[in-house]
Image (cartoon, rainbow, N blue to C red):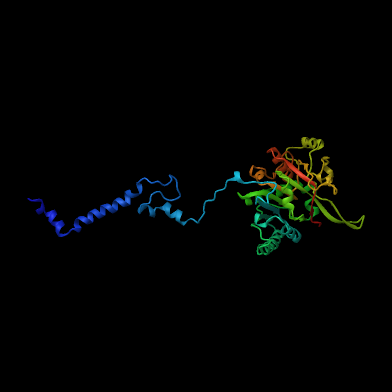
């Protein structure tokens, strides 16, 4: 039988699509299963799906990537993060941290007057979960809304936390400074401080400024002034304004006695204590005879005079953020018989950092 008379050939002549259809189907199948397997000059690793065939577009991973928000992965090189003496010129970000048990308008007015670029400052607050704390929250939120609505005073970010830990029932000065409650009170404060810093620090934070919420007066250049010393930890000297009844005139007096240099007597006391006991500075009942920075103030000397310290308070302290990142925190337990801010200074020194104070650089505590 001649080939041209074969029934299959005659079928093709009468209906050419009989052959074209199967060929087209085979071609489509090839595209579906094999076109994405060819080699490409694209990088080996990519966020785009490597299989670009029609079938692959319906794969689950492609759908997930498509639905994720833009810039869902951020990259930070902390080796390039600087904390220098000229932080403002280098646009270094500052995290200002304040545990807050009462809201003082004078405190808020003071931080609004800070001359460091507010777009480089983030604020972090932690408030006790008490009835008083509820009132503080209302006042703080109102102040934040007003400040953030003004381009001249707006800060980069504001975070407000509520404590998930205990706090003293009374925040009156005479109650919270009683010797009998110091271990309990300062352990609570340590927990609050740790929660605050580790909840708010970001990869772009270069410095942490611990500023107590009852510090109501500082130089507007506070941040730049402390930065210029380029120290891992540097503390201002906290004083208090008052009316002196002896002279009948306005006067100032030392307030924070937690900035100190260790003494032989202090070491002897520590050696005599039980493991769970602490030394609390500034009380006659526990005379350590440590040199206290509060008493080294000299109105006629340079405000940038430095003094090496072993213990610090939390009134106004600038800390390079890497000190916290390296693990220095506020112990809520006896750490070498120290706790909270003084324990923090000890822990930082154990990590190899230096601690300094500025005896002639004054900031002022609210006078109750």
| Residue at point 27%, 52% (across, down) | 27
Q: Nearer the viewer, residue 182 or 156?
A: 156
Q: Nearer the viewer, residue 2 or 294?
A: 2
| Residue at point 66%, 58% (across, down) | 155
In this view, the residue farthest toward the left is 1
Residue 131 percent coordinates (x, y): 70, 60
Q: Nearer the viewer, residue 153 or 346?
A: 153
Place residue 25 in its image quadrant. Answer: bottom left
Please indicate whether residue 287 sits to the left or right of residue 15 in the image: right
Place residue 137 in its image quadrant. Answer: bottom right
Please indicate whether residue 325 sits to the left or right of residue 271 in the image: left
In this view, the residue farthest toward the front is 89
| Residue at point 79%, 40% (across, down) | 261
Q: Is residue 166 visible?
A: yes
In this view, the residue farthest toward the right is 246
Please indicate whether residue 124 sits to the left or right of residue 23 in the image: right
Q: Is residue 211 visible?
A: no
Quarter of the picture holding the C terminus: bottom right
Residue 127 percent coordinates (x, y): 69, 56
Please indicate whether residue 248 sits to the left or right of residue 132 in the image: right
**Numbered-mark total:** 0
Residue 33 percent coordinates (x, y): 32, 49
Residue 52 percent coordinates (x, y): 38, 51
């Amino acid at each position: 039988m001649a080939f041209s008379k074969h029934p299959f050939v005659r079928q093709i002549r009468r209906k050419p699509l009989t052959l074209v259809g199967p060929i087209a189907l085979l071609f489509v199948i090839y595209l579906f299963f094999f076109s994405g397997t060819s080699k490409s000059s694209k990088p080996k690793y990519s966020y785009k799906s490597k299989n670009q065939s029609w079938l692959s577009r319906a794969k689950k991973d492609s759908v997930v990537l498509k639905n994720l928000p833009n810039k869902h992965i951020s990259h930070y090189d902390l080796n390039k993060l600087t904390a220098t003496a000229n932080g403002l010129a280098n646009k270094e970000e500052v995290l200002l941290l304040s545990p807050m048990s009462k809201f003082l308008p004078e405190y808020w007015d003071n931080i609004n007057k800070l001359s460091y670029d507010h777009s480089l400052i983030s604020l972090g607050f932690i408030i006790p979960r008490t009835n008083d704390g509820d009132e503080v929250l209302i006042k703080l939120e109102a102040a934040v809304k007003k400040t953030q609505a003004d381009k001249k005073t707006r800060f980069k970010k504001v975070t407000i936390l509520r404590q998930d830990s205990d706090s003293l029932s009374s925040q009156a000065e005479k109650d919270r400074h009683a010797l009998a409650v110091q271990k309990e009170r300062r352990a609570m404060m340590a927990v609050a401080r740790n929660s605050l810093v580790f909840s708010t620090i970001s990869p772009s934070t270069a410095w942490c400024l611990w500023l107590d919420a009852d510090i109501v007066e500082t130089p507007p250049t506070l941040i730049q002034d402390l930065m210029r010393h380029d120290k891992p930890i540097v503390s201002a000297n906290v004083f208090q304004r008052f009316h002196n009844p002896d002279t009948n005139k306005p006067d100032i007096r030392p307030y924070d006695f937690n900035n100190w240099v260790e003494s032989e007597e202090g070491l002897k006391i520590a050696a005599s204590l039980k493991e769970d006991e602490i030394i609390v500075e500034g009380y006659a009942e526990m005379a350590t005879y440590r040199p206290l920075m509060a008493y080294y103030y000299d109105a006629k000397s340079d405000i940038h005079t430095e003094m090496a310290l072993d213990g610090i308070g939390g009134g106004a302290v600038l800390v390079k953020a890497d000190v916290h990142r390296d693990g220095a925190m506020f112990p809520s337990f006896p750490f070498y018989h120290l706790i909270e801010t003084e324990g923090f200074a000890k822990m930082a020194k154990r990590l190899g950092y230096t601690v300094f104070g500025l005896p002639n650089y004054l900031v002022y505590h609210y006078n109750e």
